[in-house]
Image (cartoon, helix red, strand yellow):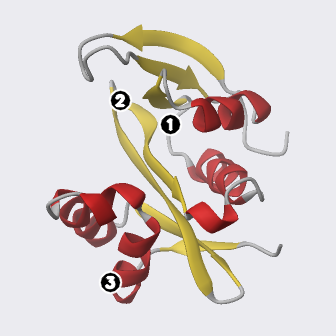
Amino acid sequence: MGIRIRDAVADDLPAVISTDSVAAADDGTRGSEIREWVARGAARVAETEGEIVGYCVMEDTFFGHGFVSMLMVAAHVRGRGVGAGLLDDARRRRRTAKLFTSTNLSNHPMRRLLARSGWRSAGVVYGLDEGDPELVFLAPAGPAGE
């Protein structure tokens, strides 16, 4: 599957929101977050055959380091390299020496993706989601592909 990754633009909003399973089920909060990320230039989208199939948000807000604050892949293309491509893109484009991300302990697909992509455990945060700790991960050193 050929994947093209580019900056998200305002015209992408409906497609980006439709790829997000949380946005489909909430009260519009996630859609508002997506609009903000796109407006700030923090979001990148993955396309295949002209269809937006995922997005990634990277911010430099984690104690002065880069942080992948959101990675979402459309359900019908999961396991086909979209998430790995978005993580590699974030590593290439990072503006800080270190890049982090996090996921819930219960998010096994994301944990497998991070392990396959060489990210390593960097800590645990308790209390964000009751009974489901947040695991923090550090990207491999150097740009993606090294």
Residue position marked by numbered label 3 in the rendering: 10
- For badge 1, the amino acid type reads Thr
Examine the rendered structure and indicate whether residue 14 appears above or below residue 20.
Answer: below
* Residue occupying the far front of the picture: 25
Examine the rendered structure and indicate whether residue 100 appears above or below residue 46.
Answer: above
Q: Where does residue 85 sit, x and y in percent of width and height? A: 71, 56
Q: Nearer the viewer, residue 26 or 40?
A: 26
Examine the rendered structure and indicate whether residue 4 appears above or below residue 83.
Answer: below
Q: Where does residue 57 sit, x and y in percent of width and height? A: 43, 54
Residue position marked by numbered label 2 in the rendering: 64
Q: Nearer the viewer, residue 44 or 20?
A: 20
Q: Earlier in the sequence, mark 3 or mark 1?
A: 3
- Quick one: SS at disc 1? loop
Q: Mark 3, mark 1: which one is toward the viewer?
A: 3
Q: How many marks?
A: 3
The N terminus appears in which quarter of the rendering?
Answer: bottom right
Q: Where does residue 128 sit, x and y in percent of width and height? A: 25, 21
The residue shown at (36%, 71%) is: 17
Q: CA distance from mark 1 to mark 2?
A: 8 Å
